[in-house]
Image: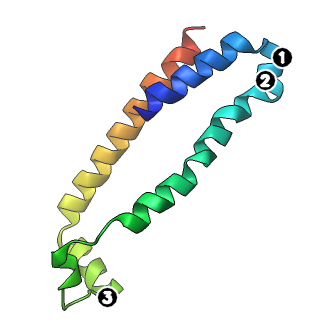
Amino acid sequence: MAVVFVALIGVGMSRILPPDQMTSWGWRVPFIIGCLIVPFLFIIRRSLQEAEEFLTRKHHPKMGEIMKSMILNWGVVLAGMVMVIMTTVSFYMIMAYTPADLR
């Protein structure tokens, strides 16, 4: 939804503003709109409640325990990293490279 929303803002801005204004200051407008939702996100975050399981947890692992767990489960960690890389590359190929290459 966020990508579609930003794309619609970009299309609207490019239709309203001439190219020289779009390159000089118009490209900043989506960033300003993005900054306007930050207070709303803080309000949402403050209103959320922690899960009961988290609140009643007695053991809080230290960094050493977390690193040991990551080393013992290196295959799962590596698979997760590969999936994130594949998702990121696919996203940028579809949303950034392809439209720029088609001009």
* Residue depicted at x 31% and y 53%: 81
What's under tag 3, amino acid-wise? Answer: Lys
Q: Is residue 19 visible?
A: yes
Which image quarter holds the N terminus?
Answer: top left
Q: Going by the image, does 101 lie left or right of 29? A: left
**Where is 17 relative to 33, above or below?**
above
* Residue depicted at x 55% and y 47%: 37
Q: Is residue 92 visible?
A: no
Looking at the image, which is closer to me, 68 or 53?
Answer: 53
Of labels 2 and 3, the one closer to you: 2
Q: Position of residue 66 (x, y in %)?
A: 28, 79
Q: Position of residue 84 (x, y in %)?
A: 33, 46
What's under tag 2, amino acid-wise? Answer: Thr
Q: Going by the image, does 100 lie left or right of 86? A: right
**Where is 78 relative to 57, above or below?**
above
Looking at the image, which is closer to me, 31 or 78?
Answer: 31
Residue lying farthest bottom? Answer: 58
